[in-house]
Image (cartoon, rainbow, N blue to C red):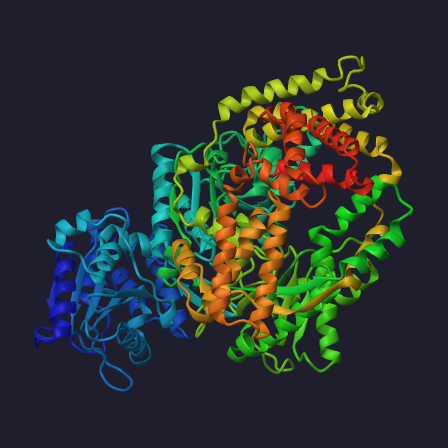
Amino acid sequence: MSQTPEYLYSELPAIELFKKLGFNYFDASIADTRESINEVILEDRLRQSLLKINPWLQDNSLEKVARKLKNIQASTLMEANQIVFDFITKKDSITEKPTPEAKPQPVFIIDYENIENNDFLIVNQMKYNGIHKNSIPDIVVYINGLPLAIIEAKSPKVSITDAISDLSYYQENSQKLFYYNQICVGINKGKALYGTIGSQFEHYSKYKLEDLTELELLVERTPTAQDILIYSLFKKEMLLDIIRNFTIFEIDQGRTIKKLPRYQQLRAVNKILDRLKTQNKGGVVWHTQGSGKSITMVYLATKLRREEAGFDNPTIIVVTDRIDLDNQISSTFRRTGFSNPIQAVSISNLKELLKDSYGKTLMTTIHKFQERAEEQKEEIEILSDKSNVFVLIDEAHRSQYGMTAAYMRNSLPNAKFIAFTGTPIDKEEKSTLRTFYGGSDYIDKYTIKQSVEDGNTLAIRYQTGMPEYFIEKDLMNEVFSSVFGHESEEKQAKLKSRAASLDTFLMAKRRVEEIAKHIIKHFKEKIYPNNYKSMLVCHNRYQAIAYQKAFLKLKEQGLNSFESKVIMSFDNKKDPIEFRELAVEEDKIKKAIEEFKLPFGNENEKSKSGEKRFDNTAILIVSDMLLTGYDAPIVQCMYIDKLLKEHTLLQAIARVNRTKSGKEYGLVVDYAGITNYLTQALKIFSGDLEASDVMTDIENEKTILDNRHSKMVAFFNDIKIDRFKDRIKFVDECVLYLEPEDLRDKYIDLVKLFNKSMDIVLPDSFATKFEYDLKLYNDIKLEAVNTHTPEKMFITREETKKIQMIIDEHLRATGVHYLLHDAIDITDPEAFRRELENKSGKTKELTIANRIKHTIAANKKENPDFYKDIAKRLEELIKAKEEDRITQAQLLIEFDKLQEEIRNSKEEWKRLGLTSKEQFPIFKTLEKVVPNPKEFTIAVFDKVGMYLQKSDWKDHDDIKKEIRKNIKSLLRNNGVDKELVNSLPITILEILENQ
């Protein structure tokens, strides 16, 4: 063998490592034992191995088996490969009789139980006959005479893509060699990738190890990438495990695709099995969106089913939180050849299916447990008490918590629960870890950053475009007074609050129309030229329809040539007629979302099976649907006009991170201002949090729950009616009892605290005894509020429409302004923050403006008047720069002044002579409306200070009512304008609540 760099630095080290792993070796360039290069099987070794594993084989049977393995009859390479795979992995695929009179028994090609009973061999530089010329792969891995893996080595100076290209060429040139292939590998020392037959370059994977200690001892140096891959995949036990348990053939749009596991899938499944065997409990697997959780579940189910795993032919239940996800994962199991997964139509059906002693794979949704939980008022029905029931929960998050999850766990008391999630809940919410059997750590964790580094998902870039607008405030106030002036002052204050709400602002017609223009322009310039598509996420269904109307209006004006569709659920009783006119009909939704995945082209062209080949829908408009579980690699961009947070935000933007040939990144364009939420979510879900950060002291909370329940029940001690025997009468009496507003406020506080404790303790079975009272006392609260609140204080639908019309008429949108000149990669949270800060020139100008805007957004509730002034001055500066009235240098100087003013505001209260920093925002609110704001501010705190000393005053509506009353009295006694006497107490209370 010539001493080329390829041989010295890649091929030779690989051979040496294989030898250390216990493989036999010979150099085919020196001695080839075959009679002809047409032979791909080493027949002598095959026969010897068959007899060793199946010593009962007669000579004629041995020849029949060898002939069957040698003469594969198939029309395609993939078909031949699948036939061989069945031969080497499935128990009854080849059978023979030990004697003419005996029953047929299975012939094992590979001994998976006694690993050393197999013949492991590597050969290098072996020639194989080809269509064009001889193929000479660098290393071929033989097991029992069959060529099950092929490795192509390159010099470290040569791209790894050359190795993958050679593997593809060999598959076409020497097809028969790949009938038997289970793994294809490309190596060049510093890089190493593995895939299967038919894999394109983007579907080859790298392998990573958590602990290199053992490998370092084996190779006696720092391991290279190719060392890691060969060691990880080709240790004898692991290699056989991958072939038997982690290789699947999936049908995708009529085409068969062979898949191997990614390293995190292998690692997670084997860790789960280890925990089940050693600790007899389940837990949580946190693998980020797009990392193949559904396939991981297939691998896990496959290994649980193995007889030698020792789980006694278990029943496996796969639980999702939506019907479409239930259908999706059921389809995944079927497409990958998993035997007979059954979708349970109801809990009764599930109970029947669980009666059988032999194992089944069952699919259901969490909501079926919810239906039964509502039916069962007292005693929980045991669906199965078998211990070999394994519940695999897909996307374990909010809907899996609460009474439903408690019922599910209690109805399967001995089952093991394994939860898969891409977005664990943060420490402010429930702990996914605690929910699924109290593990103190995750079974396995695979973060966004790791997934992007590995090429399993794409980096997501973030761009924020802020709609510019101004409100004709004076004119709007005049119209508001003419429409609602007849209402009471209290009702007018409530109507004004609704007018200032987020819903009303986001729905403003001109705002939506300006953003729609921007979306079409951006899509046309940035997304469509590369043949990708987009999704638009809207605040609610009404806004989704508003955007569709705006897009259609742009079409009429000749400014939009793209098709868009609205996908949403319907409420037949309440929805306006235009919902059904402008959204995709209910029975056509499934077809529309599947066809959206197709490329642009002639929609009249059909495939051989008669299906559409192309679909020209460019933008899919949604509100809540398709934000989780929808896998459409053709989607590159997501436009967001909805305040998404935490796991919902991360799940939504993951729609754009799926890999596709030529697609370099996913893009998120934000019109709603979610930068702060995104930063927070990335921190939570980056993988930096320890298990202790999301754990809750559940035992302590049980005592609190018990006490809060007792107080709530005791509140109605004077009502001598049995709440269990005569529920309706009990509710009626309680509602009458709550007529006094102060009594009603106290009761509402009690219910809130009880609900909070229930939320923390659930789904622990301790909480299930309070299920009846949870619904009862909340029903009483709702009915009491509806009964005793004056009708005039309710805001009607008609009034809501009038408010929206006023806003639509007087909010002027002037365009969309990019706050970041370039889109920023969000994959690494720290890098995301650094990149925001390191921009220069025009981008620096936009970034600082964005930072100030988000500082305003984050603090305006705490100090509204101060930040309102800052916001006004910021907009004036931006406008002045756009009109060339000031230079960029002047703008940046003024920005620095604003930032300095914001920083100084933290200590401004001392200079003013106030007694605490909490008084400053109240001072800023009062300084424009009272002559002596300092004295008045101090007087306010003197008046309400006793209430603010209570640590939980914000949770008590009666205390808040007293605070408003005291401030109102103070204002009235000091001659403040009547309108301000009504509105200022509400404003001041909001400031205090946000401190």
Q: Quadrant of residue 205?
A: bottom left
Q: Which image quarter is the N terminus in?
A: bottom left
The picture places residue 699, in percent across and down from the top left corner, at 49, 23
Q: Nearer the viewer, residue 870 or 733?
A: 870
Q: Is residue 171 left or right of residue 301?
A: left
Q: Residue at x 30, y 67 (%)?
A: 180
Residue farthest toward the right in the current orientation of the protein: 486
Examine the rendered structure and indicate whether residue 276 appears above or below residue 81.
above
Total label count?
0
The picture places residue 491, in percent across and down from the top left corner, at 84, 42
Q: Nearer the viewer, residue 816 or 66?
A: 816
Q: Residue at x 76, y 58 (%)?
A: 473
The answer to whether residue 551 of the structure is visible from this angle is yes
The picture places residue 245, in percent across and down from the top left corner, at 36, 52
Q: Is residue 767 left or right of residue 20?
A: right
Q: Quadrant of residue 440?
A: top left
Examine the rendered structure and indicate whether residue 88 appears above or below residue 169.
above
